[in-house]
Amino acid sequence: MAKTRRAIGLKITLIIAASVLIFSAVSVGYSYFYLLDPLRNSVMDSRVKMAELAANSITILLEKQAELVNTNSSAEYMKEAVMRANAKYQGMDAEGARRYLLDINKKWLKAGKSGDTIPISPEVDKG
């Protein structure tokens, strides 16, 4: 009789343990599929909104820069400065212009390595 009681008690314990494990597994599955999905969607929505805001900010910045470039490029003083700068190269052939630019580059590199101030134009500092 004691063996039968133990066997019945063991069966009841196993049934309860199995029920708890099944209930736990179902609860975890439910929470994973039905509770985490809205959280995941919420995070995705906020990331999409942040990306849209960043894209809009970059678009506005680029539009302002393009407007500034258009304004400056149509300004008369800018056209005159470009014409003066290009006047140096009018009498030169392609090889002469290349040698001139390489010479300027060497002067800039020399000034940079020696710690001197690098001139904006080598004509300013004939050294």
Image (cartoon, helix red, strand yellow):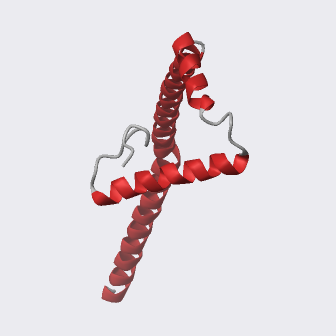
Q: Residue 55, how many percent across, how many down?
A: 53, 29
What residue sits 45% from the left and 48% below the top? 31
Report whether 91 appears left or right of 102.
Answer: right
- Closer to the camera, 62 or 98? 98
Q: Residue 102, how many percent across, how many down?
A: 55, 53
Report whether 121 appears left or right of 95.
Answer: left
Report whether 68 appears left or right of 98.
Answer: left
Quarter of the N terminus within the rendering: bottom left
Q: Is residue 10 above or below residue 51?
A: below
What residue sits 52% from the left and 18% below the top? 68
What residue sits 34% from the left and 76% below the top? 9
- Closer to the camera, 41 or 60? 60
- Closer to the camera, 2 or 120? 120
- Closer to the camera, 13 or 55? 55
What residue sits 33% from the left and 60% below the top? 113
Q: Residue 71, how many percent across, how many down?
A: 55, 13
- Numbered marks: total: 0
The single residue placed furthest to the left in the displayed view is 115
Q: Residue 6, how many percent across, how many down?
A: 33, 83
Report whether 124 appears left or right of 68.
Answer: left
